[in-house]
Image (tube, rainbow, N blue to C red):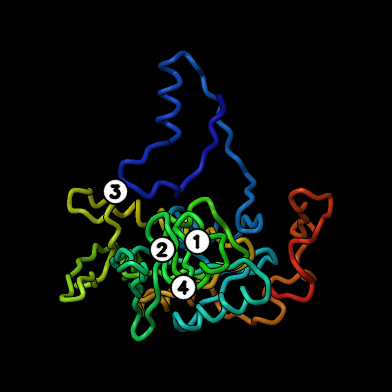
Amino acid sequence: MITLTGSGQSVRPNEVGSVQLITEAAQRRGIEPVIFDLQDQFRCGGSDAYRRWVHDLLGFADRSAQPWQPDGLMHIEVADSPGELEQTILQEHRAGASARMVAGFCWPWNKPKGRIRRLVRDVRVGGWHRKWNAWGDNYCEDGAPPAKLWGVKPEGVSQIGCVYSSQGLEWDWCGVILGDDMVWRDGTWVFQRGKRRRVSPVKIWRVRKSGSFDPEVRSSSVEQDDFEDCVRNAYHVLLTRGSRAVVLYSTDPQTQEYLKRKVGAVAHEGLRPTWKNLPPPARRTLTMPGTRKRVVRMRQEVLF
């Protein structure tokens, strides 16, 4: 048996799968596992520097996060508003890149309304209101795809995904909105559980107290340490969905300033990954299904 080690993937309190657990289970059956600590990874354009930066930023490592140093594989920038983040993602989507917006589970998630399955604009930051990806297995109003297709159907680009609809997927560009479930205070991360309120007569849920609204983790029955681990891991998943570039925004002003310090100044020209400034290993090709035709992953004239 081969055990591949990893971190930051458990986003529910009852999820299991640690190296120790697998090792003990194997040994009880007379199997001695072989553990490989993989040094290379395929996500995030193969950028080990970005992977380490995310680990440091979220506090997984026993070292402080350092300002990002562009490596030609991954690009990071911090938007000044959710609207700016959205415009960047839509611009790249129109240019031909795969792109999506995701967010921490920091707003209630109302089910589709009525026979037309209208999606409620649940994600609300000031006057900027957008919809979560569709709940369930059916299409919704205006062709919004079901949750399992949100990440691959072009109509999904205008909705916001969460950790549960994003796991296992990646896009060239990913816009990540950090909510008030994880905020930066006095040199450390502080984790908060949200509370909701019912709005009558429309019968929808809204925020009463900012924080996590993930029903799997915000319950008072979940120990604080487990709650913090799940929220931190959820952001690890969200921050590693981009294969070329990530755009960040935090709803919390102090956290937003912290992100800006850790990302540093961004000069878009020459730093956003293009075909010309990508190192040769990143210039991947792929084969179209059902054909022998090989096409380049990135068009030379498009910024990704």
Q: Is residue 194 left or right of residue 9?
A: left
Q: Identify the residue position indicated by label 1 in the image.
A: 150
Q: Earlier in the sequence, mark 1 or mark 4?
A: 4
Q: Distance between the residues labelled 3 and 2?
A: 28 Å
- The residue depicted at 57 percent of the width and 58 percent of the height is 170
Q: Which amino acid does label 4 sit on?
A: Asp
Q: Determine the CA span between mark 4 and mark 3.
A: 38 Å
Give the spatial CA distance, label 2 vs label 4.
Answer: 11 Å
Q: Which of marks 3 and 2 is nearer the N terminus?
A: 2
The reply to whether residue 59 is in sight is no
> Residues under labels 1 and 4: Cα distance?
13 Å
Q: Badge 3 local density, few (<14 within 10 Å), some, or many (20+)?
A: some
Tell which tag, 3 or 2, sits nearer the viewer: 2
Give how far across and how far down residue 116 sits, in percent. 37, 69
Q: What residue type is labelled 1?
A: Trp
Which callout, 2 or 1, points at the residue further toward the start of the chain?
2
Asked whether 68 or 235 is in front, the reply is 235
Of labels 4 and 3, the one closer to you: 4
**Callout 3: SS:** helix
Q: Decide: is 288 above or below 73.
A: above
Mark 4 secondary-structure assignment: helix
**Amino acid type, mark 2:** Ala
Q: Mark 3 or mark 1, which is nearer the start of the sequence?
A: 1
Q: Distance between the residues labelled 2 and 1?
A: 8 Å
Say which of 226 and 238 sits in front. Answer: 238
To which residue does mark 3 refer? 226
Residue occupying the point 35% across, 57% down: 231
- The residue wearing badge 2 is 134
Q: Earlier in the sequence, mark 4 or mark 3?
A: 4
Question: Mark 4 Cα within 10 Å, few/some/many (few <14, many 20+)?
Answer: few
Where residue 142 is drawn, which disc sits there?
A: 4
- From the top left corner, tell me how far across and down residue 36 is, in percent: 58, 33
